[in-house]
Image (cartoon, rainbow, N blue to C red):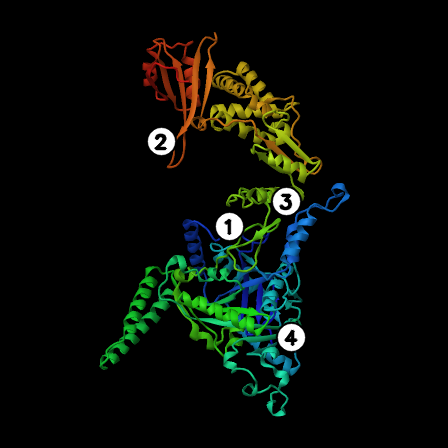
Amino acid sequence: MRIPIRHIAGHLLWSTHGSVWALYRLHPGPDARGRREETVQGTYVPAAVRDEQLARITHLIRSLSGAPRLIGLCAQIDPGEVALRMIEGIEPADTAPDDGPHPWVENVEATLDLLDGQEMHRRTLWLAVPLQTETAGLQVSASLGAMWAELSPMLGMRPAPVTRHEVSAYREQAARVEAALAGGAAFRPARPAEIVWIVQHALHRGLPEPLLAEAEASDLYGGQVRDGVLRSPSYADLGQVRLQEGGINPALDNVENLNSAGQITRSGRKAWWRLNSASPLRRRWLQVEADAGTGYQAQLALAECPPAVSQDSADLFAQLETLDFPVDYTVDLALVPAEKARDQVRRKKNELIDQADQYEARPTGMPASLTDAARDLGELDARLSRTSVEVEVQSVTVLTVWGPTAAVCDARARALAALLGGADYRAVRPAGLQEALFTLGLPGTVRPGVVREFTQHQVSEDWALGGAFTASEVGDPNGMFLGIDLDCGTTRPVTINVADAPKVDASASMGIVGDLGAGKSVLEKLIAEAVWARGGCAICIDRTPVREWATFARTAAKGRVQIIDAAKAEVSIDPLRMFNGPEGRHYALSYLTLQLGIGPMSTSGEVLHHAVEQAAASDAPSMHRVLQVLEEMATSEAGKRQDAAATLAGLVRVVATNSLARMVFDPTLPPVRLDASSTSDMIVITTTGLKLPENRLTASAVTYLGSADGQCGWWLHYTRREEGFGEDGDLAHVLTLIAPCACGTYITVELVDEDALIVMLDELDTPPVACNYRLRVREASWADARHDSTEAPF
């Protein structure tokens, strides 16, 4: 077999047919060279996300031109590859616990035993774009160079070289293609080893194949520009295979029992009609014989699509993932501009009119199919006329299945055809075209003319509904082996690494749903165990009455665990004592603004920020020191800052005097140690003995502000409500001051913000308040007063 690769320079491929292609990998995953403006979603995505993905893919199709080719391949996964992903990121320990093996070794070995012998694959998408230079001379040079490359071996001469100028011109053209692709799916240029892997994968279907993971990290097969010309390694060894359509399986055809010399033809093959097997028309597969063995492939061409299909069930390529065997697909596209496509539609309409005139002379009249065809052409014309950027997608789709034996390959091909037939798609295995359809999936080949009969005509949005450019993945690139993806029909391992989520700007939140006794708690403990076994530190909040997480931690991480009883307050979780520098200041300020219910950009927020900065810069930084700084500011500052500092000091003092707040504000308690490498693998905080507040107080807080004489005072009430403020669904913050009145009732004042509270406290006399004060409050723009309650509010 002759490989169509002549040169490879980066992601550019010079083919033996005279064309130059740029190859890109779509959805490359976490890669330094990959573009990550989108993330791959799972199977279950909201409708808004699905519509956004459809719009992006439609835009990508409209931004392309010419005849690009989309290749979707199922890359084989080896159990050792999963094991490498499980140990990725782990730093080797100097000494293992108890001088035994690393705690993660047992998990890796168990995963290897479980996945051994499984047929595992992962979906990879590749986009090949033919490049057309604006210089006609370069195009002619490429064609002549390819022609000479075919003839030169016969004459014993070298093929024409590719010059540096030609390489630079095609790289500029590829840069323009990448600029057009920027608004669509995430992509990166393919590596030379990955381009070669595409060929190796096509030739090793049904056999042990080279791993894509090795190609992703390889620097081989790339050409270099030296002495002004492009020089590439030889790719001839890739084609050392034998292709035979309908190849004979010795076990199936019982060839060994045929001894007559008359059964041998001049070509050296046995005549099929004299074999104890069916006609070759029934052996519609391609036999590929390589060094690794013999594999069997079946190529199915999509011959007919339903005239109309709902949007929810149009994702043909996404539904291929549900099959219990892998399926590769190649989609050769021809993108026709709207104006040219409309001209073709007009010609077809004229042909329909001529056919209608001919059928009128027949007694049976005009068939119903002509009416349906006229309606379809009218709809296509209308959609092409809607916008000038619309394109018509003329696609040839080839689906490939394979197996280690011809029987397995044939059974999978029949199952795939039956599945598509149930959805009104007709897929055929054309006899005599198996090799032609096979070569369509190789990078750099031209579309054989005989496959044009399988062309499907669609507008860009309809074709994008098929889901060819989308991928469904779940999990992280490395981490613990969580299980098998049930949305995929084949075995697809899922790894998860919750500890690395903040490093990649992702959320580590996850939910586990299951029936009673299904193992939800067990899975949580396995994930926690994986965190510390891989070198991290697991911090758990145990709210179970029997303290089951504390018991688990003492057993799983014996000798390297901290148990913190929140009800007894034996250790401190003061962020200024646990973390140094900006990290500790950030955590402390975030906690206090949330605890006190103040805005970070208000006057109180600025005063609190200043107090946290001063406390963190002291010799003994702590949250208790923040309270001391606020008290000092309340006596040294002036104006609004003094009032805000006094108010904040009072609020912090109310919180700090609570017994539950000792873990934060008591400077005498020893701080929690978070250095997992030297002290603890797990930190468990038990909350048994703590009672949650009543439901009516979960969204509110009340603070009593006593007067100077200690006889009576005001109540400050903070709550949140949905009405009146904020956007739909947001909660508005409401601050209310309640003061006793001289007449025995209470004045309730709803404040606009914290500054209004400070102004009111300056104006208020020692309670009780005079009755005429509510009249002055009503005239103010920052508050509204009510004077109608005779009972104490709290």
**Helix, strand, or loop for circle 4?**
loop
628 to 573, vertically: above or below: above
Mark with earlier residue (4, 3): 4
Q: Which kind of residue does numbered mark 3 sit on?
A: Ala
Give the spatial CA distance, label 1 vs label 4: 41 Å
Quadrant of residue 350 in the image? bottom left
Q: Mark 1, mark 2: which one is toward the viewer?
A: 2
**Helix, strand, or loop for circle 2?**
loop
Q: Nearer the viewer, residue 62 or 131?
A: 62
Residue for badge 3: 530
Give the spatial CA distance, label 3 vs label 2: 45 Å
Residue for badge 1: 37
Q: In the drawing, what numbered circle is on residue 723?
A: 2
**Helix, strand, or loop for circle 1?**
loop
Q: Nearer the viewer, residue 262 or 19?
A: 262
Identify the image quadrant of the C terminus.
Answer: top left
Residue for badge 4: 240
Q: Which kind of residue does numbered mark 1 sit on?
A: Glu
Q: Mark 3, mark 1: which one is toward the viewer?
A: 3
At label 4, counting other C-alpha atoms closer than 10 Å, the crowd grade (few under 14, some 14-19, many 20 or more) is some
557 to 632, vertically: above or below: below
Q: Position of residue 786 (x, y in %)?
A: 33, 18
Q: Which kind of residue does numbered mark 2 sit on?
A: Glu
Extreme residue toward the right, this view: 99
